[in-house]
Each structure stands twice: as C-alpha cells, then as structure tokens.
Image (cartoon, rainbow, N blue to C red):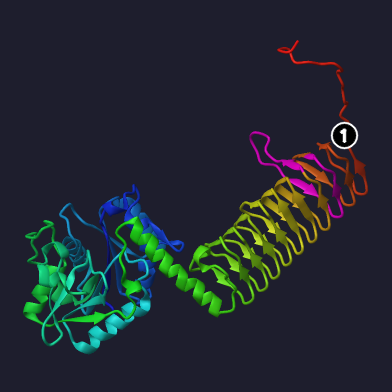
Amino acid sequence: MALSAAIILAAGEGTRMRSSKPKVLHSLAGKTFLERVMSSVSALEPNTLAVVVHHQAELVAEAARSYDGHVTIVNQDDIPGTGRAVQCAMRQLGEAGKLEGPVLIAASDMPLLDTATLKALLDFHDASGDDATVLTTNLDDPTGYGRIIRERDGGVLRIVEQKDANSSELAVHEVNTSVYVFDAAVLARAIEGLDSKNAQGEFYLTDALETAHANGKVGAFTASDALSVEGVNDRVQLSNLARAHNRRVCEAWMRAGVTIPDPGTTWIDDDVEIEQDVTILPGCFLQGGTVIAHDAVVGPYTTLIDVRVDAGASVERSRVQQSHIGAGATIGPWTYIRQGNELGESTKAGAFVEMKKARIGKGTKVPHLSYVGDTELGENSNVGGGTITANYDGVHKNRTRIGSNVHVGAGNLFVAPVEVGDDVTTGAGSVIRHAVPDGSMVYSENTQHVVEGWKPEWER
C-alpha cells in the first residue's frame, strides 16, 4: 500500500525530562528517539517524510536532516498541540502538491516503534476500509495515556485524554499510542475545525478522530507488543524501557550462541554484531558499530565503542574506542585504548596502558604503565614498563617509529619525531631523541649525585 506521506511530531519541549536537550534527541540503545522513529517510518518508503519541529527547532531539524537528507522540515507556530502540528504539516505538504491516499502520523517519543508494527497498521487500515485508524495497545496501568472509547461494533467513538476523562473512561485499559493513519482528504477536513476547548488548552489531534467518525468510519488496530509503542515522558520511563529492551537484546544474542552470564549488567546497542562462542562477562557496555568475532572474551567491566575485535582476542576491565583488536590479542586490565589504534595479531596492551593512533605489529607487547601515542611499533617487540612516547611539542602531534624485534628498557622516553630501527635494545631510563640504526644498543647517561647528611631546610 503506497504511503502518501508520513508526519513525525517532534515539536514538543518534553519538560518532564528536565533537560536542556530536546526530548527527541535523548538516546536509547545508541540512537536518539527521533532517529529510531525516522528509521522505522522511512522503511515504509513514504512519498514524503515530514518532521514537525518547534522547541529548539534548529537543533531538532539539524538532527533530522542528518538522519535523512530528503526529510521535509515543518515549523510549528506558537499555537500548542499535536492537532496544530498536523495542521501546519498538512498546509505545507498541500502547498507542495496534492496529497492522495494514506497519511501516517507518529509521535517521536516512542523509541522502540518498529517498521513491522507500522506495516501491520497500514495493512489493517487498507483491508478495513476505514477513513482513519488509530494504533492502540492494552496496558495494565494506563495512567497518563488517552483512553480508547469504542462503539459496540468495535469502531472507535473517540479518544479521551486522561485529564478530560470521567471515572468510567479512566477504567479503560486500551490506550492511544499517538500513531494514526488517515485518508489524506479525511485528515484535511478533520483538522480544519479543531479548537482548544479542553483542560490543556491545546489543539488535540485526537479531536480530529471525532470529526472523522462523524463523517465516516474510524477503526483501531491493537499492537501485539506493548513495548514497541511505549512512550517516554521522563527519565524513569526511559530507564525502564531501556532495561526491558536491553533484556530482549541480550536474550536474542544468547539464543544466537553468545554467552552472557549476567544480562542485567550487560548493555548492548542495536547495531553491535557478535559472532557465536563470544563471551560477554558482567559489567560490559558494547556501543555503536562494535563487531566481535568468535571465541573472543570481553569483560568484565569493559566498554567498547565502535571497536572491531577479532577471533580469540580478550579485553578485560578496559575502555576501547574506534580501534581494531587483532586475533588473539589481550587488552587490560585497566587499559585505555583511544581512537585510531590498530593492534595486530597476538599483541598485548597490559595494565594501565594508554594508546592513541598507534599501530602495533604482530606479537608486540606493551605490558604495563605506558603511554603509546601517534606511534608505529613493528613485530615481536617488547616495551618496558613506564615508557612514554612524547608526541606533542606544544604545537604539533609527531610520530614515533620503532621497528621489529626491539627490546625497550623500563622507563624510556621517546621524544617524537624519532625513528628506531629493527633489532635494537634500549637501556633502562633512556631518553631517545635521535634516530637509532638497526642492530644497535642505545642508552643515555644520567649522572647520579649523592649528598650525604642532607636535611630539608625546615629541619636544619
């Protein structure tokens, strides 16, 4: 069924979030609410995708365009309400060309709204011949939601917002999800006569359904999964929804062959990819486009952000971002791998090591207490504890190049830019400022001075 237009409502302030950031730009499982809803709606391939903005309009519009470069931005005026948002959208879309066929309307604060549910709604609308169809769900606790008041034949008579509902209407458990499908012509007529004569003093879109009912037929399609249509109004609801969603994500990975001993403390974003026989230990956060190959072990207490972990590697009690961890490599504990690193097969970054834009060759080890930044390390080299690559001269970041089969003594300082050849040994405590040729041993002398019987001034 061809979708004439889709209108996503993203104009609200979301005051209950208590945030300087628009509610629709808060995130769940690695994506903002708006991005998630736009993605689900875009998969239906509407002829026009419109996002209505008002509160922090420029910020929300910029985000929407980053998610879909073809989106139509509609600016709602200062008149409040979802009904007014749709009035503004229909006016702008009508000026761009005549609308014919179904128009989908969805709220942007439903981060788990999925394409399958929307497709089922559209199919039901098409098969029923309704002039308008509202997506509903049944909740054990419907507090805060508009109630669906049905006719005897099952059609929708009206939707009553909680603040306007009487005691019998408040007892209804079927609620409005703020997702609708209207015939374009019916919608255009229904929103013409909206007013703000209600407890909130707003233009309700739900009132348009009463107009549609007076002139035609309004139906309801009940979503099979209440989680997929749950809205978020405050951070408590966001936390509860994120936890429920994450539990499903973890269970899906476990059924796919991933070992997750404690799903309650393991958080996995939607775009993460995990192969069979991976073990994710407690306290882990797998974020962004992280990819983990088979037989790898992650955790405990590890954060991976946009990281590729090859087969058999292990990352323990560390933070790694935007890097590639080679097969059989070991990371941690207490290691910080910043962006832009390439750690080869069977490498090691041990306890309290920090790396940034480093390339570490096969079999090379940086065991502990070192900083390796803007550095290339060859194969099968060993870096002694307490080694620093001094990459910043106050203006530029400079590179250090250290060859293969190099033994770096403890407490070395490489002052970049500097290059050290293959098969080199450096003495403990050396400061390397100049190039070192292959097959050399290099050290720097530091004269030791002893002052016997010395006491601090205050003691003297």
Question: Visible in this render: residue 457?
Answer: yes
Residue at (85, 16) in percent of width and height? 453
Residue at (10, 82) in percent of width and height? 216
Residue at (86, 49) in percent of width and height? 407
**Left or right, 393 with reference to 139:** right
The image position of residue 80, as x and y in percent, is 17, 56
**Left or right, 279 with reference to 113:** right
The image position of residue 263, as x and y in percent, is 52, 68
Total of numbered circles in the picture?
A: 1
- Residue 224 placement: quadrant: bottom left
Which secondary structure type mostly characterizes the magenta part of the structure? Answer: loop
- Residue 214 placement: quadrant: bottom left
For label 1, the residue is 444
Chain part drawn in magenta: 386-413
Assess whether residue 401 is covered by the magenta stretch. yes
Crowding near the residue tagged with mark 1, few <14, some 14–19, many ≥20 C-alpha atoms within 10 Å: some
| Quadrant including the C terminus | top right
The image position of residue 324, as x and y in percent, is 66, 61
**Left or right, 95 with reference to 24:** left
Residue at (66, 59) in percent of width and height? 316
Give the residue type that dot 1 points to.
Answer: Ser
Residue at the outermost front position:
459
Rendered position, 354 above or below 11 = above
| Callout 1 secondary element | loop
Task: Report the front residue among 314 and 95.
Answer: 314
The image position of residue 298, as x and y in percent, is 63, 64
**Left or right, 277 with reference to 329:** left
Assess whether residue 64 is covered by the magenta stretch. no
Rendered position, 144 above or below 357 = below
Residue at the outermost top position:
460
| Quadrant including the N terminus | bottom left
Question: Visible in this render: residue 68?
Answer: no
